Amino acid sequence: MKNILVTGGAGFIGSNFIHYLLENYGDIQVVNLDLLTYAGNLDNLADIREDGRYHFVRGDIHDRKLVEELFDAWTFDTVVNFAAESHVDRSITNPDIFLTTNVLGTQTLLDVAKKNWKLDPDDKYSREFKEGVKYLQVSTDEVYGALGPTGMFTETTPLAPNSPYSASKASADFVVRAYDKTYGMPVNITRCSNNYGPYQFPEKLIPLMINNCLADKNLPVYGDGMQIRDWLYVEDHCTAIATVLEKGRLGEVYNIGGNNERANIEIVKLILENTGKSEDLILHVKDRPGHDRRYAIDNTKITTELGWSPKYTFQTGMASTIEWYLQHKSWMDKIVSGEYMNYYETMYAGR
Ligand code: NAD
Ligand code: TYD
C-alpha cells in the first residue's frame, strides 16, 4: 500500500481513517477525493494540511474524467471508498442523490480502477490484474435489514435493505461483487455497524444528543427508544479496514462490529449523566418510517481469520467521545451555525 485514494475523506469515518493512515504508515501518499457536501468538513483534517503525504482534491466520485486524471497522476494501488450519502433520515426525504452517489459513484470508481489495474484492459476475457492492487468498499450492516430480538448478521445473511439509504448501499455491494465475479477485480467489502467517535456530523444520534445536551435542548428520541444498534468506536473501525486491506482474502466480505449492542434510550441517558443534565430533556417524538428495530454484527470471520478485534469497550469509547466533543465545542458550533439548523428545523418540525 503506497499510493492510496481515499474517497469521502472529509467526512466522519474517512477523516479518522486518513489520520490513522498518516500516523501508522510512514511511506505513503494519500489522496482524499471529496465533494464537500454538507457532511464534508475540511476542519476535520486541519492538523494534517501541511503533511507532504496528504493531498486534497475537491470533486465527485461520479465524475469519470476527474477520477481518470487522478489515476493518471498518482497510479494508485489502493482505493478505499467511504464517499456516500450516509444519513437514513435524509434518504427518506430525498432518495435520488443516494442512488447517484452511492451506486453510480461506486461503479465509476470501480470502472476506472479496472481500466488502470487490468494487465490487458482490451482483452475482455482476461482476469489478470496488477500485483498488490485492491479496491475496498466501505459498506454497512444495514444492507442485511433488521433483526428481531435474537440472532446476528453474518456475511452470509441475505441482503434485505429497508431504507433508501441501505438499498443504495446494498446495490453498490452487488456492483462490487459483479466486478469481482465478472472481471476478477481484486476487491473486498466491509460491513460495519454504527460508528461513533470524534468528527461525526451532529445529525447522527450520539453527536446530536451531546450537542443538544450542551445547548439544553430537548433530546428527540424516535418512538420508544428501544431500537438497538451495535456500536463500533471509529478507531476500531479504522484498524479493521487497515487489516482487511493488508490481509483480507480477495473477493471476501468482512463484517466489522464492536460487540456493543445498546438501546438508543440507554445511550441518551448515558450522555445526560455524563454531561450532568436532567432526563427531563428527553422528548419521545414520532418514529422514523420503516425504522429498523435491531442490528447486531457477528464479527467471528474477521476476528478468527484476520486476527482483528475491537480495542474499545462501550465505556471507554463513550468516555473518550464525550470528552472529545466537550474539548471541541468550536468545531461543533461552526457546523451547527449554518445549513444544519435549517435541516434540523425541517426534520424535527411537527414530530
Ligand atoms: P459522512 O456522511 O460523514 O461522510 C461522507 C463523505 O462523503 C463526506 O465528506 C461527503 O462530502 C463525501 N461525499 C458525498 N458525496 C460525494 C461524492 N459524490 N463524491 C465525493 N465525495 C462525496 O459519512 P461517514 O459516517 O463517514 O460514512 C462513511 C462511509 O461509511 C459511508 O459509505 C457509509 O455508508 C459507511 N458507514 C457509515 C456508518 C456510520 O455509522 N457512520 C456505519 C456503516 C457504514
Ligand atoms: P443514526 O445515528 O441516524 O444511525 P442509523 O439510522 O444509521 O442507525 O440513528 C441511530 C439510532 O438512533 C436509530 O435507531 C435512530 C435513532 N435516532 C433517534 O432516536 N433520534 C434522533 O434524533 C436520531 C438522529 C436518531
Image (cartoon, rainbow, N blue to C red):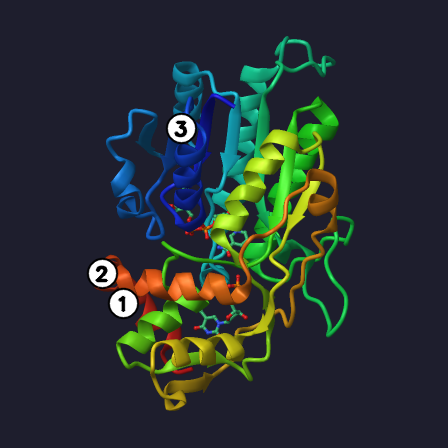
Instruction: Return the mark for residue 341.
Output: 1
Q: CA distance from mark 1 to mark 3?
A: 33 Å
Work out whether residue 286 or residue 152 is closer to the camera in this orientation and state it: 152
> The disc labelled 3 sits on which kind of residue?
Val
Q: Quadrant of the C terminus?
A: bottom left
Name the mark nearer the viewer: 1 or 3.
Answer: 3
Look at 74% across and 44% down and name the residue there: 304
Q: Do labels 3 and 2 touch, CB within 8 Å?
A: no
Q: Position of residue 86 (x, y in %)?
A: 47, 53
Instruction: Tell how many labels.
Output: 3
Left or right placement of residue 224 versus residue 58 in this view: right
Q: Residue at x 26, y 41 (%)?
A: 47
**Residue pointed to by mark 2:** 338
Looking at the rendered structure, which numbered label has been put on residue 30? 3
Q: Are marks 2 and 1 in contact (CB under 8 Å)?
A: yes
In the image, residue 231 sits, relative to residue 101, either above or below, namely below
Which of the 4 image quarters holds residue 345?
bottom left
Residue type, mark 2 in image: Gly
Furthest-bottom residue in this view? 280
Label 1 vs 3, first from the N-terminus: 3
Q: Secondary structure at mark 1?
A: helix
Disc 2 within 8 angstroms of ligand 1 (CB): no
Query: Eyeballing the image, is 71 above or below 320?
Result: above
Residue 314 in the image, given as x and y percentages of width and height: 53, 65
Give the mark nearer the N terminus: 3 vs 2. 3
In-image side of 58 versus 171 (left or right)? left
Residue type at numbered disc 1: Met
Q: Residues within 10 Å of mark 1 (few under 14, many from 20)?
A: few
Indicate the secondary structure of the residue bearing disc 3. strand
How far across and down, in percent of the image, does residue 251 sit?
Answer: 71, 32
